[in-house]
């Protein structure tokens, strides 16, 4: 009797993640779910029964990377028809049917709002493949994402997704003692260039008890650093007296001001009793989980970032001194066209307040160059803002027109690509100088470092560079002898130093000896003492 895929031993899965931390967390949850069902995850796609790509749509370049991989898999699928090829995440949501039409080798599609369905989709795809091979049916089932589910019964979908987060299985040893926890799904801000509101759906905040319990459970399992995730974490709010759903009364409308004080140095959204704000959430997690060594969060929207949040951080040493505040542009004219909801002056005021409350904090930002109509003057203003803010690093992107956004319909992509490139390099150059100066300031100091992983250098040497999209990740194969480790300071500066891999997941003192624009290099402080 011929063995069928159903009858063979454990099925293997290769899962590659593109895009943001939200996707990293989603991939983790999907992996946990599939592992619980007996699937085994492997590092090589060549031998896997199931190949999954968790994808990103934020820029065309991000999508092209996936297209070319999917293209490469065409002949692999022809030779190995039992293999299931699945596209998860934002591209599946955005590109849906089109992708299956162009790439019939894709067996399943699953948007971010439907990830709890992945095992079912894989099962269905396997059955369909079997039928294909037996000649019973030729048509391939392409199961799509959640657009219908999102619009029809969004709260039900959100509840099921909530279960996905709550049911997470986690082994701290696999993650170097660090974990992501989602606090908000989706985004309602509709910045004119951005595809995220279309791919992730509208903003829904998780119940604070669910978030707290998840953090507590993770810490009980050995996690020492938690990063709270959301597209605009500072807008987190939850009325514990009411169930907040997408139709709920506390969902802010686009552009709606919840409090006249917000963003001007006053508190974050003013709420009545029973409404948990982001500041409340941070304080609760910090104060009631004392074993948690580090609490971080990304990303903050520069609009409506109140002093209440800064005060909570200031009073709590285990909340990291790091803020990711994407400014996008230093030109008020462009900020308006982007629908960001703040001015350069308001952004500078926020930076001043951060410096006042948290003088030791490090800041990072995102910038888009070449947004439609951007002039040399706009670029000069952005350069000036970079010099004013002194970010420890900036992620600088060339504007990429995205389907179904306001910007693509309203504006021509009129900045030539070589101009975008030039402006990108110009800002990178300015940022590199600033980063070097900031890093130089650490040389000779001893700083606590949360050790995350074996460094990329060691991984490369060990031939274990399976996943370059996640720059810091635990490599279990590397011997636990002295090797180069990588970790981060409370201000999110990357530090490399020699030590035993047993230190992963711990916070230790490192004496900084050398600085490059992106990395600090040092030695274990105890080693330093013994040598003197
Ligand atoms: N929620 C975050 C950003 C999420 S997307 C915020 O509001 O700041 C991450 C970054 O990708 C953005 O900050 C922006 O700099 C960049 N980005 C998003 N859409 C883009 C586009 N169409 N072209 C180029 N960069 C883009
Ligand atoms: Fe995109 Fe703006 Fe939402 Fe950030 S806040 S995810 S840039 S729409
Ligand atoms: Fe990309 Fe989706 Fe994240 S578009 S940036 S993976 S939310």
Image (cartoon, helix red, strand yellow):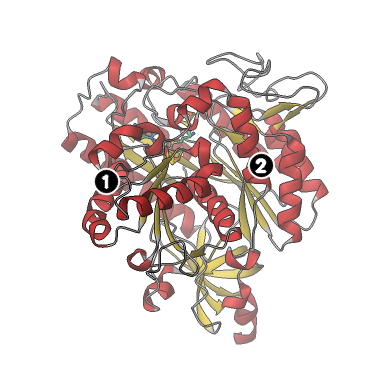
Q: Relative to 159, is 512 above or below?
A: below
In this rendering, does residue 359 appear at all? no
Tag count in the figure?
2
- Residue in the image at 73% along x and 57% along y: 219
Q: Is mark 2 within 8 Å of ligand 3?
A: no
Q: Relative to 454, is 358 above or below?
A: above
In this rendering, does residue 440 appear at all? yes
**Foreground of the two, 66 or 291:** 66
Please give the residue where the numbered disc 1 appears in the rendered image: 67
Question: Which image quarter holds the C terminus?
Answer: bottom right
Q: Quadrant of residue 370?
A: top left
Please give the residue where the numbered disc 2 appears in the rendered image: 163
The image position of residue 30, as x and y in percent, is: 54, 51
Q: Quadrant of residue 182?
A: top right
* Front tag of 2 and 1: 2
Q: Is mark 1 within 8 Å of ligand 3?
A: no
Residue 420, numbered label: none
The image position of residue 143, as x and y in percent, is: 41, 39
Q: Relative to 132, is 211 above or below?
A: above
The image position of residue 50, as x and y in percent, is: 41, 58
């Amino acid at each position: 009797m011929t063995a069928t895929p159903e009858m063979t031993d454990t099925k293997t899965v290769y899962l590659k993640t593109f895009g943001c931390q939200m996707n990293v967390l989603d991939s983790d949850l999907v992996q946990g779910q599939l592992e619980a069902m007996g699937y085994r995850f492997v590092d090589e796609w060549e031998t896997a029964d199931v190949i999954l790509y968790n994808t990103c749509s934020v820029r065309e370049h991000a999508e092209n990377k996936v297209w070319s991989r999917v293209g490469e898999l065409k002949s692999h699928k022809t030779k190995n028809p039992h293999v299931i090829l699945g596209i998860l995440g934002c591209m599946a949501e955005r590109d849906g049917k089109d992708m299956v039409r162009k790439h019939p080798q894709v067996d399943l599609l699953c948007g971010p709002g439907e990830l709890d369905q992945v095992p079912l989709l894989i099962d269905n795809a396997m059955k369909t493949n079997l039928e294909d091979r037996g000649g019973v049916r030729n048509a391939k089932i392409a199961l799509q994402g959640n657009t219908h589910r999102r619009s029809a019964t969004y709260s039900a979908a959100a509840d099921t997704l909530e279960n996905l987060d709550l049911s997470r299985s986690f082994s701290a040893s696999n993650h170097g003692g660090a974990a992501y926890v989602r606090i908000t799904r989706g985004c309602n801000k509709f910045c004119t260039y951005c595809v995220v509101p279309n791919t992730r759906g509208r903003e829904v905040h998780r119940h604070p008890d669910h978030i707290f319990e998840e953090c507590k459970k993770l810490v009980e399992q050995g996690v020492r650093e938690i990063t709270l995730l959301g597209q605009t974490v500072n807008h987190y709010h939850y009325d514990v007296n009411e169930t907040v759903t997408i139709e709920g009364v506390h969902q802010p409308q686009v552009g709606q001001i919840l409090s006249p004080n917000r963003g001007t140095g006053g508190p974050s959204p003013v709420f009545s009793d029973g409404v948990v704000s982001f500041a409340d959430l941070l304080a609760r997690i910090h104060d009631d989980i004392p074993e948690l060594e580090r609490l971080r969060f990304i990303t903050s929207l520069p609009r409506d970032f109140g002093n209440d949040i800064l005060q909570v951080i200031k009073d709590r040493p285990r909340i990291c001194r790091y803020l990711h505040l994407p400014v996008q542009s230093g030109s008020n004219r462009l900020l308006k066209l982007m629908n960001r909801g703040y001015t350069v002056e308001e952004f500078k005021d926020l930076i001043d307040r951060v410096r006042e409350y948290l003088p030791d904090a490090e800041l990072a930002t995102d910038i888009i160059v070449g947004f439609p109509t951007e002039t040399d003057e706009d670029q000069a203003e952005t350069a000036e803002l970079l010099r004013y803010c002194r970010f420890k690093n900036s992620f600088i992107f060339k504007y990429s027109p995205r389907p179904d956004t306001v910007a693509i319909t309203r504006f021509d992509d009129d900045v030539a690509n070589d101009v975008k490139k030039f402006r990108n390099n110009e800002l990178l150059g300015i940022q590199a100088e600033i980063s070097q100066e900031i890093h130089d300031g650490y040389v000779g100091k001893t700083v606590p470092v949360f050790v995350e992983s074996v460094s990329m250098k060691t991984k490369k040497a060990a031939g274990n560079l399976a996943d370059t999209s996640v720059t810091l990740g635990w490599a279990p194969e590397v011997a636990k002898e002295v090797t180069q480790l990588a970790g981060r300071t409370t201000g999110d500066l990357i530090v490399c130093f020699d030590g035993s891999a047993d230190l992963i997941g711990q916070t230790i003192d490192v004496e900084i000896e050398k600085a490059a624009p992106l990395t600090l290099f040092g030695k274990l402080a105890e080693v330093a003492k013994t040598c003197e």
